[in-house]
C-alpha cells in the first residue's frame, strides 16, 4: 500500500493522539499513472469546454455568473449546515427583510471571499494563490457573529480533529499545528511548480483540494476555503474562463462519498479513487450547469419575445426586463433607482411586466409591494 504520510504524536485536551502529517504532493511510491485518468480527464475537460461555449447563448455572461456564483456560495455553505436558500439571498440583495440573517451572512461572506480571490488573481499586481491570499479570504469568510471565535484569517494554533466527540475517537486527526505552515508552503510550491508535465491540470486541482483538507489549517471554514480554491484554480489554470460551475452541488449530493474518499487517501493510500471521483464530479457538475444555462436562455428569450410583441411596452419596461436576471426580486423603489427614472415611470414598467405575466407581486398589499421574476427563481432553485 502507498504511504501518503506519517504520524506524529500530538497532544490536545490532555490526550496524546497520533496526528497525520501528509507527504508533499505529488503522490509518490508509486506515482500516479497519468494514463489511468486519460478518459475521465478528457470527459471532464470536454464538459468544461462545452459549458464555456454555451454561455454564448445569452447576451451577457454576467447574467449567468450572477446565479452560478450564488449557487456555489449557497451549496458550499449548505455542506456546512447553513440553512439559507437562494431566495433568501435574492431577498437580501433586494433589501427585503430575511429571517435567518446569520445563515445569509455566511453565504454573502463566501461571496466576498470569492470576489477577493478572483480580483487578486486577475490583477497583475494582486496576490498570487498563496497563504496570504487564503488567509485574507478566510478573514472575510469568518467575518461576523459565527466566525468570531474561530480565529478568522489565522492558521490554527491548536490541535483539531474531525468526527468524534474528542481527539481519541476522531475519524481524522490533522497535522499538529506547528507543522501547518510548512505543509502549506509545500502545497503552495506544488501549485506554482509548472514542472508537472505528466499530470493534467484538473488532476492537480483534485490533489490540491484533498491535500488542503488533510492539512485542515484553520479552526473552521476549511471545507469552504478548500472548495473556493477549486473554483479559483479552475479559472486560474484556464480550465473554465468564468466560474459558471457549482461543483459543491455534486459534493453535497455525494457528501458521504466525498468525505470517505478524502479519508481513503490517508487510510488506504488511495489517491486514484479520489481523483476519479473528482473528475467525474466535474463532468457531472459541468453538464448540469450547461443544462441550467440552456433553460435560462430559453426562458428569458421566450419572455423577451412576449414583451417585444406587446404594443404597450416602453423603453423603461425593456430596460427593466434586461435587469431581471441579476435582480430577480425587487421593489418599485429599487427599480426606480436602477433605471434612474421617476417613481411613476418605474411603476408603469413594473406593472407592464406584471400584466405580461413575467413578474408577480408577492405581498398582496397596497404598500411596500415586492415583485419576483418567479419562473426564473423557480428554474434556479429547482
Ligand atoms: N475524513 C476527512 N478527511 C479529510 N478532510 C475531510 C474529511 N471529512 C471532511 N473533510 C473536509 O473537512 C471539511 C469540514 O471542515 P470545516 O468544518 O473546517 O470546514 P467548513 O467550511 O466550516 O465546513 P464544511 O465542509 O463543513 O463546509 C469538509 O467539507 C471536507 O472538505
Ligand atoms: Mg465547519
Image (cartoon, rainbow, N blue to C red):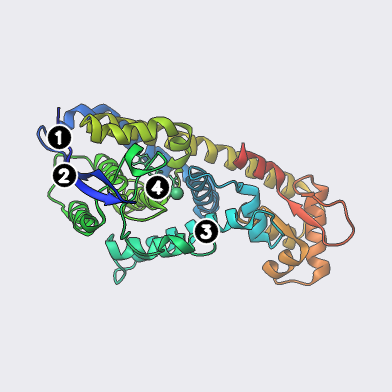
The x, y position of residue 294, in whole percent, is: 54, 38
Question: Which is nearer the eye, 193 or 17?
Answer: 17
Give the residue at mark 3: 146
What is the distance, in whole Å, between disc 2 and disc 1 at their CAs?
Answer: 8 Å
What is the distance, in whole Å, between disc 2 and disc 4 at their CAs?
Answer: 20 Å
SS class of the residue under badge 4? helix
Mark 4 touching mark 1, by CB under 8 A? no
Q: Which of the image's four quarters has the N terminus?
A: top left
Residue 27 lies in what quarter of the image? top left
Question: Which is nearer the eye, 335 or 70?
Answer: 70
The x, y position of residue 218, in whole percent, is: 35, 56
SS class of the residue under badge 3? loop
Which badge, 1 or 3, comes first in the chain's sequence?
A: 1
Q: On residue 23, which mark appears?
A: 2
Residue 115 lies in what quarter of the image? bottom left
Is residue 152 shown to the viewer in this render?
yes
Mark 2 touching mark 3, by CB under 8 A? no
What is the distance, in whole Å, between disc 4 and disc 3 at their CAs?
Answer: 16 Å
Q: On residue 3, which mark appears?
A: 1
What is the distance, in whole Å, between disc 4 and disc 1 at their CAs?
Answer: 24 Å
Closer to the eye: label 4 or 1: 1
Q: In this view, does 380 lie to the left or right of 196?
A: right
Mark 2 touching mark 4, by CB under 8 A? no
Q: In this view, does 12 lie to the left or right of 332?
A: left
* Residue at x 43% of width, y 37% of height: 251
Give the residue at mark 4: 223
Amino acid at each position: 500500500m502507498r504511504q501518503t504520510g506519517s504520524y506524529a504524536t500530538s497532544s490536545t485536551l490532555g490526550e496524546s493522539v497520533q496526528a497525520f502529517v501528509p507527504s508533499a504532493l505529488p503522490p509518490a511510491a508509486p506515482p500516479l499513472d497519468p494514463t489511468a485518468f486519460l478518459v475521465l480527464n478528457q470527459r471532464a475537460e470536454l464538459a468544461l469546454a462545452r459549458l464555456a461555449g454555451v454561455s454564448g447563448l445569452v447576451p451577457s455572461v454576467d447574467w449567468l455568473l450572477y446565479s452560478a456564483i450564488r449557487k456555489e456560495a449557497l451549496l458550499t455553505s449548505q455542506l456546512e449546515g447553513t440553512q439559507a436558500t437562494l431566495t433568501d439571498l435574492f431577498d437580501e440583495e433586494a433589501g427585503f427583510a430575511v429571517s435567518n440573517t446569520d445563515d445569509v451572512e455566511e453565504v454573502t461572506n463566501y461571496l466576498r471571499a470569492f470576489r477577493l480571490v478572483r480580483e487578486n488573481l486577475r490583477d497583475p499586481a494582486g496576490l498570487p494563490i498563496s497563504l496570504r491570499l487564503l488567509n485574507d479570504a478566510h478573514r472575510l469568510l469568518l467575518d461576523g457573529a459565527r466566525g468570531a471565535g474561530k480565529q478568522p484569517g489565522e492558521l490554527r494554533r491548536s490541535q483539531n480533529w474531525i468526527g468524534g466527540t474528542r481527539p481519541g475517537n476522531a475519524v481524522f486527526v490533522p497535522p499538529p499545528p506547528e507543522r501547518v505552515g510548512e505543509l502549506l508552503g509545500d502545497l503552495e510550491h506544488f501549485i506554482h511548480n509548472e514542472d508537472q508535465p505528466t499530470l493534467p491540470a484538473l488532476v492537480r486541482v483534485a490533489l490540491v483540494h484533498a491535500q488542503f483538507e488533510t492539512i485542515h489549517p484553520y479552526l473552521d471554514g476549511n471545507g469552504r476555503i478548500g472548495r473556493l480554491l477549486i473554483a479559483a484554480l479552475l479559472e486560474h489554470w484556464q480550465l473554465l474562463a468564468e466560474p459558471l460551475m457549482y461543483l459543491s452541488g455534486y459534493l453535497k449530493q455525494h457528501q458521504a462519498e466525498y468525505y470517505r474518499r478524502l479519508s481513503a487517501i490517508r487510510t488506504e493510500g488511495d489517491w486514484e479513487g479520489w481523483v476519479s471521483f473528482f473528475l467525474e464530479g466535474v463532468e457531472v457538475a459541468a453538464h448540469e450547469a450547461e443544462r441550467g444555462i440552456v433553460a435560462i436562455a430559453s426562458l428569458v428569450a421566450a419572455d423577451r419575445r412576449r414583451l417585444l410583441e406587446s404594443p404597450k411596452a416602453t423603453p423603461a419596461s425593456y430596460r427593466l426586463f434586461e435587469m431581471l436576471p441579476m435582480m430577480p426580486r425587487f421593489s418599485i423603489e429599487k427599480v426606480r433607482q436602477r433605471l434612474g427614472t421617476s417613481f411613476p415611470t418605474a411603476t408603469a414598467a413594473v406593472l407592464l411586466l406584471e400584466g405580461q405575466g413575467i413578474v408577480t407581486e408577492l405581498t398582496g398589499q397596497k404598500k411596500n409591494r415586492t415583485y419576483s421574476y418567479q419562473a426564473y427563481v423557480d428554474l434556479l432553485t429547482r
